[in-house]
Image (cartoon, helix red, strand yellow):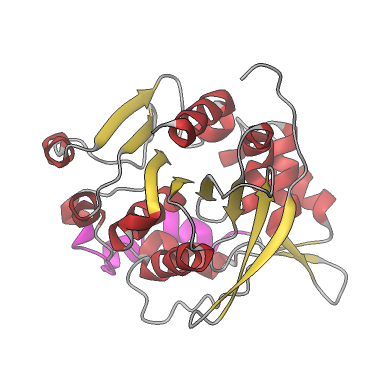
């Protein structure tokens, strides 16, 4: 792509039968063509976080970036009791694809969103043209079997999420608290502002609160009873994985032969990138998505 032009998205809502609520989404691009790409965000994030990354594609493609259950403006219930995996996210995405009822789309996602796309494609392969996954959460098979164990429930990721501050005086205070710190060190000001804009809800007392509660974020970190390795074999669409060079959550070391045996996985490591590679390399994200959408 040459000139980078950002387009403001259209807010949409989808009532998903049998799922208990509505899925919110941001839509980009011309409305007179089928949706080309459905994009799913990372744990604790929201659709608007990726606005500056995805919106330039609207000049050529129609995209739908969703707020997953328990995030952003979606009203799908976030229930942690007895939860062992991400089948709820998978089934929400399947319900959305069935409701769209159109030509196969490119499914794409970051981190938890990438893993959700993989799981959903295994359920409805006829709805999916290709997958483009940015550092998806793929744990080794032995850790999948440990889902719900005390070791996982007491991991630093889970405990850190539970300690996360949920309430701020306003969005400006939240923005100041996050700027240049922790996971946000490599983010642009616009990316951080979009995360805050889409990630907080107004409270009756005038303050703002995280749309993704610390308890739900922690549940997502703790719940890995789903099986991405089975999904690699069950689906049929080509999969392109762009993996972080540092601290990747795509933990496939020693299992590359399993991916190769599927005949449909292309794995690339992005130099000098962290788990937040979509924020660090938006150009690479756009190029990968455009190539997938235009592929025959």
Specify the farthest residue to the right.
206
Q: In this view, does 187 lie above or below 81?
A: above
Q: Is residue 276 above or below residue 283?
A: below
Q: Residue at x 24, y 59 (%)?
A: 227
Q: Residue at x 75, y 43 (%)?
A: 193
**Is residue 152 located in the magenta-colored stretch of the structure?**
yes
Q: Nearer the viewer, residue 294 or 17?
A: 294
Specify the farthest residue to the front.
32
Q: Is residue 197 above or below residue 206?
A: above
Figure quadrant of the C terminus: top left
Residue 110 visible in image: no
Q: What stretch is highlighted in magenta?
A: 144-164
Q: In this view, does 145 lie to the left or right of 243?
A: left
Residue 243 visible in image: yes
Q: Is residue 54 left or right of residue 118?
A: right
User: Where residue 32 appears, x then y in whole percent?
Assistant: 67, 48
Q: Is residue 1 left or right of residue 276?
A: right
Q: In this view, does 7 lie above or below 44?
A: above
**Is residue 11 located in the magenta-colored stretch of the structure?**
no
User: Where residue 99 appears, x then y in whole percent?
Assistant: 51, 68
Q: Is residue 168 left or right of residue 293?
A: right
Q: Nearer the viewer, residue 230 or 42?
A: 230
């Amino acid at each position: 792509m040459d000139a980078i032009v950002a387009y403001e998205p259209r807010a949409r809502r989808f009532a998903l039968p049998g799922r208990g609520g509505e899925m919110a989404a941001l839509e980009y691009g011309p409305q007179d063509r089928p949706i080309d790409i459905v994009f799913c965000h990372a744990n604790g994030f929201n659709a608007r976080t990726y606005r500056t990354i995805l919106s330039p594609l609207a000049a050529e493609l129609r995209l739908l970036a969703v707020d997953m259950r328990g995030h952003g403006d979606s009203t799908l219930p976030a229930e942690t009791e007895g939860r062992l995996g991400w089948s709820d996210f998978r089934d929400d995405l399947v319900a959305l694809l069935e409701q769209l009822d159109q030509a196969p789309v490119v499914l794409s996602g970051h981190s938890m969103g990438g893993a959700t796309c993989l799981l959903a494609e295994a359920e409805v392969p006829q709805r999916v043209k290709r997958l483009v996954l940015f550092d998806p959460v793929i744990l080794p098979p032995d850790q999948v079997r440990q889902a719900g164990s005390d070791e996982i429930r007491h991991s630093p990721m889970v405990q850190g999420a539970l300690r996360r501050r949920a309430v701020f005086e306003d969005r400006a205070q939240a923005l100041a608290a996050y700027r240049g710190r922790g996971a946000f060190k490599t983010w642009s000001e616009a990316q951080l502002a979009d995360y805050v804009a889409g990630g907080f809800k107004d409270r009756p007392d005038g303050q703002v609160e995280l749309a993704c509660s610390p308890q739900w974020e922690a549940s997502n970190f703790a719940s890995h009873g789903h099986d991405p390795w089975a999904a690699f074999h069950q689906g049929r669409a080509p999969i392109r994985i762009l993996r972080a060079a540092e601290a990747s959550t795509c933990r496939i070391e020693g299992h590359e032969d399993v991916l190769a045996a599927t005949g449909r996985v292309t794995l690339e490591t992005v130099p000098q990138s962290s788990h937040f590679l979509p924020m660090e390399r938006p150009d690479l994200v756009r190029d990968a998505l455009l190539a997938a959408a235009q592929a025959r």
